[in-house]
Amino acid sequence: MSTYFMIGKYSFEALKEVSAARTKKAEHLIARYQGTIKDMYVLMGQYDLVMIVDLPSNEDAIKVSTTLTNMTGISFMTSPAISVDDFDIFAQMEK
């Protein structure tokens, strides 16, 4: 499993549809791709939402991201993430 940050920007139409039911649909979609949601936050500023998810592959992350955008009207910027601990180990190996 790999971790991904999915950062979302609501369209005007997407704001009208905010609901716990839509959140559940997103959770089910991610689970359908063998993923799990580690955390979800609403943001103030340039972006409106961030989800931290674990998914099996980049391909699955792309599928989830595009499907969620089509399903919700929320535009997602999805990016793989690596823990600082893992990064520090990798950086030491490269020296």
Image (tube, rainbow, N blue to C red):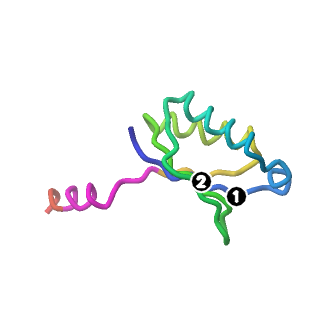
| Residue type highlighted by circle 1 | Lys
Circle 2 — which element?
strand
Give the label on residue 77, or none: 2
Left or right: 45 as drawn, with respect to 89: right
Left or right: 67 as drawn, with respect to 61: right
Determine the CA span between mark 1 and mark 2.
9 Å
Q: How many marks?
A: 2
Residue 12, magenta (yes or no): no
Q: Name the residue under label 1.
A: 9
Q: Quadrant of the C terminus?
A: bottom left
Tag 1–tag 2 contact (CB < 8 Å): yes
Q: Quadrant of the N terminus?
A: top left
Residue 21 point in image, percent of width and height:
75, 40
| Residue type highlighted by circle 2 | Met
Pointer 2: residues within 10 angstroms few (<14), some, or many (20+)?
Answer: some
Front one among 93 and 68: 68
Mark earlier in primary sequence (1, 2):
1
Give the residue drawn at x 57%, y 53%.
Answer: 40
Left or right: 9 as drawn, with respect to 35: right
Give the residue drawn at x 67%, y 36%.
Answer: 67
Residue 10 point in image, percent of width and height:
75, 56
Give the label on residue 71, or none: none
Residue 84, magenta (yes or no): yes
Circle 1 — which element?
strand
The residue sitting at the bottom extreme is 45
Q: Vertical placement of 38 versus 30: above or below?
A: below
Give the residue drawn at x 40%, y 42%.
Answer: 2
Front one among 33 and 38: 38
Q: What stretch is highlighted in magenta?
A: 80-91
Residue 80 point in image, percent of width and height:
45, 50
Give the residue drawn at x 51%, y 34%.
Answer: 60
Which is the main secondary structure of the residues drawn in magenta? helix
